[in-house]
Image (cartoon, rainbow, N blue to C red):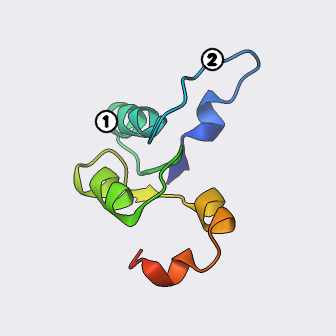
Amino acid sequence: ALDEIAVFARAGARIPLGAGYQTSFADEIRREAGIATGAVGLITTPVQAEHVVFTGQADAVFLARELLLTPGSRGQSSL
């Protein structure tokens, strides 16, 4: 699997912020390269994470920052 942030991290890149703002990168890489991807980028709820996976935008989601910001949130999710 590929975490798409590593592909698009470059000096001076301007990426607009918003809920799930990097899922389109994961989706494009998944379709074009035919490999598994993991999405990041303000994915903050279990419903949002499930949507990304079930709609085929990515094979997995990474919630590290959200879990660090909201201690105990692991118990609130089935992810």
In percent of width and height, residue 54 lies at 24, 57
Q: Residue at x 37, y 31 (%)?
A: 28
Q: CA distance from mark 1 to mark 2?
A: 23 Å
Among the two numbered marks 1 and 2 on one chain, the one whose residue lies closer to the N terminus: 2
Query: In the figure, 26 relative to 61: above or below?
Result: above
Badge 2 is on which residue?
A: 14
Query: In the figure, 71 relative to 19: above or below?
Result: below
Nearest to the observer: residue 60 or residue 21: 21
In percent of width and height, residue 53 lies at 31, 56
Disc 2 marks a residue whose amino acid type is Arg
Number of residues whose C-alpha sits closer than 10 Å to that of mark 2, classed few (under 14), some (14–19) or many (20 or more): few
Task: Residue lying at the far bottom in this picture: please name it.
Answer: 75
Nearest to the observer: residue 51 or residue 27: 51
The label on residue 70 is none
Secondary structure at numbered mark 2: loop
The label on residue 31 is 1
Number of residues whose C-alpha sits closer than 10 Å to that of mark 1, classed few (under 14), some (14–19) or many (20 or more): some
In percent of width and height, residue 27 lies at 36, 38
Could you tell whether 72 is left or right of 18 in the image? right
Query: In the figure, 43 relative to 32: above or below?
Result: below
Q: Residue at x 46, y 57 (%)?
A: 61
Could you tell whether 62 is left or right of 49 in the image? right
Secondary structure at numbered mark 1: helix
In percent of width and height, residue 79 lies at 42, 74
Residue 63 placement: quadrant: bottom right
Disc 1 marks a residue whose amino acid type is Arg
Q: Residue at x 48, y 56 (%)?
A: 44
Q: Residue at x 65, y 57 (%)?
A: 65
